[in-house]
């Protein structure tokens, strides 16, 4: 990297974890904390570590999400991250666009949850034909997990067990 290319890159030390980002990327959001931190005449006086990286006392596990917003203008968030944590970091770094995206995600998640709570339980059924000479313990053992005996129908020659299982959005597959 020549001197000009090096000056375009900013080193950041976020609570001991190092990141690099270009000035061009930060310039996409000129009102943000990071852009102002890295501009010489901004008046911000942040500390630097021994490598020249700006010291930022924030949680590094959220920082990839912050940088991705600078780069793409979208919310890319790992499942294991707290939405409230990302929102707090977005507020700190003065990223109102990211705050709005996180709030939208939270509203959508809450709406989905409420819809799931309000929807009636769905049930699926299956029938097992039981012959007179079959051992009842074998029949019970062969009932798949999550299925319960809902009805027992009998005639002179055989018995039919009607099994039922509650269906959730996560378990719509057919367990035969």
Image (cartoon, rainbow, N blue to C red):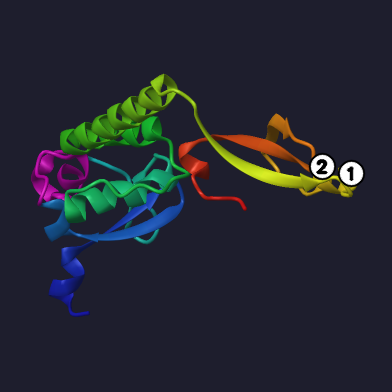
Question: Which residue is drawn at the image coordinates 82% and 42% (left, top)?
Answer: 140
Question: Which residue is drawn at the image coordinates 10% and 51% (left, top)?
Answer: 28
Q: Are marks 2 and 1 in contact (CB under 8 Å)?
A: yes
Residue 158, percent across and down?
77, 42
Question: Which residue is drawn at the image coordinates 14% and 38% (left, top)?
Answer: 43
> Which corner quadrant holds the N terminus?
bottom left
Q: Count neighbours of disc 1 (C-alpha within 10 A) and say few if under 14, some if 14 to 19, many if 20 or more.
A: few
Q: Which residue is mark 1?
A: 137
Residue 49, percent across and down?
38, 53
Question: Which residue is drawn at the image coordinates 25% and 37% (left, top)?
Answer: 93
Residue 22, percent across and down?
19, 61
Q: What are the residue bounds of the magenta stretch?
A: 28-44
Residue at the extreme bottom: 2
Q: Nearer the viewer, residue 28 or 122?
A: 122
Q: Which residue is mark 2?
A: 140
Residue 62, percent across and down?
39, 44
The secondary structure type at the circle numbered 1 is: helix
């Amino acid at each position: 990297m020549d001197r000009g290319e090096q000056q375009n890159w900013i080193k950041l030390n976020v609570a001991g974890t190092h990141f690099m980002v270009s000035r061009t990327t930060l310039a996409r959001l000129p009102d943000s904390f990071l852009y102002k931190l890295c501009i010489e005449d901004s008046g911000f006086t942040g500390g630097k570590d021994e490598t020249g990286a700006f010291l930022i006392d924030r949680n590094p596990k959220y920082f990839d999400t912050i940088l991705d917003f600078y780069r793409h203008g979208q919310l890319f968030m790992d499942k294991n991250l707290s939405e409230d944590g990302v929102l707090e970091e977005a507020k700190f770094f003065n990223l109102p666009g990211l705050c709005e995206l996180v709030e939208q995600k939270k509203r959508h998640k809450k709406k989905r949850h409420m819809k799931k709570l309000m929807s009636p339980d769905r049930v699926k059924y299956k029938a097992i034909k039981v012959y007179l000479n079959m051992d009842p313990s074998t029949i019970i053992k062969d009932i798949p997990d999550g299925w319960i005996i809902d009805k027992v129908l009998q005639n002179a020659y055989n018995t039919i067990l009607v099994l039922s299982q509650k269906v959730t959005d996560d378990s719509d597959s057919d367990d035969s």
